Amino acid sequence: MKTKTTLLFNLIILVLALVTAALFWNALPDAMASHWNINDQVDGTMSKFWGVFLLPIIMAVMLLLFFLVPLVDPLKQNIEEFRPTFNLFITLINGFMAYVYGLTIAWNLGIRFKMSEMVLPGLGLIFIGSGYLISKAKRNYFIGIRTPWTLANDLVWDKTHAIGGKLFIATGILLLLSMFASRYAFPILLVAVFGTVIFTFAYSYFAYSQLDK
């Protein structure tokens, strides 16, 4: 996906979110549900203004950061090597945020569903997309598995990201499968994420230690 196309498409997503806010403003409650616990019970609310505009603001800030990061990275030429994949990931993240925003608006309009079951497919796709991005990423200071050893050597970076990408994709698939048993989704997510972080950190050190050999 080209950078200009990515920017235009994501701006359209943001504008649609704001149009949604304008259309349903009067129908939304003054105190909006904004957080659900693992039992799908509302345990947090916020004012209508923040309930309607917080996620679009976050989306706008994230979009700005996504486009600024490659400009200030000392290894920005490496980012250009996987820029189409990065652009696709930007769209995936913003699309997920818009999806969560839509679910939040729907809930506050009185439409009832299990929030965890609705969020899981999007979350699973985020991990799969992250894994694909990681597997394509070249050494840089902002995107990927950044340990002292991956940042120090291209070979260590590539080997760590090859296996890290597969682990992230596997986590995404597990989350998609957990849709059929949503009560296990949170422990699956915790174990998979912490396991992946610990393993890739240790593996990057091991790969670096093998360079001389």
Image (tube, helix red, strand yellow):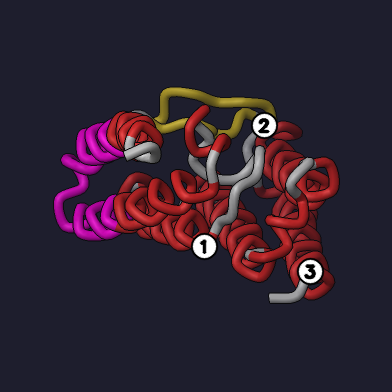
Ranked by sequence position, the earlier of labels 1 and 3 is 3
Three-letter code, disc 3 = Thr
Residue sitting nearer the eye, 123 or 82: 82
Give residue 125's quadrant in the image.
bottom left
Q: Is residue 81 magenta?
A: no
In the rendered image, residue 151, in percent from the top left (x then y), is placed at 57, 36
In the rendered structure, the answer to whether residue 10 lies left or right of residue 112 reads: right
Q: Residue at (46%, 53%) from the top-left corner?
A: 158
Question: Where 20 falls versus 191 (above or below)?
Answer: below
The Cα–Cα distance between marks 1 and 2, rounded to whole angstroms, is: 45 Å
Residue at horizontal 51 percent and vertical 59 percent from the top: 133
Q: Secondary structure at mark 1?
A: helix
Residue 77's spot in the image, x, y percent? Answer: 76, 56
Residue 103 placement (x, y as % from top left): 51, 52
Given contact means CB atoms under 8 Å apart, are the residues at marks 1 and 2 in contact?
Answer: no
**Circle 1 sits on which residue?**
136
What's the residue at 61%, 28% (across, down)?
31
Front in this rendered view, residue 186 or 132: 132
User: For mark 3, does the 10 Å Cα neighbourhood hold few (<14), some (14 to 19), or many (20 or more) residues?
Assistant: some
Q: Nearer the viewer, mark 2 or mark 3?
A: 3
Q: Which residue is mark 2?
A: 30
Magenta span main SS? helix
Using the rendered image of the protein, determine whether residue 39 is visible from the camera's viewpoint. no
Magenta-drawn segment: 170-196
Real-space CA distance between mark 2 and mark 3, rounded to the nearest whole angstrom: 39 Å
Classify 162 as above or below 47.
below
Q: Nearer the viewer, mark 1 or mark 2?
A: 1
Q: Nearer the viewer, residue 89 or 203?
A: 203
The residue indicated by pointer 3 is 3
Element carrying mark 3: helix
The label on residue 127 is none
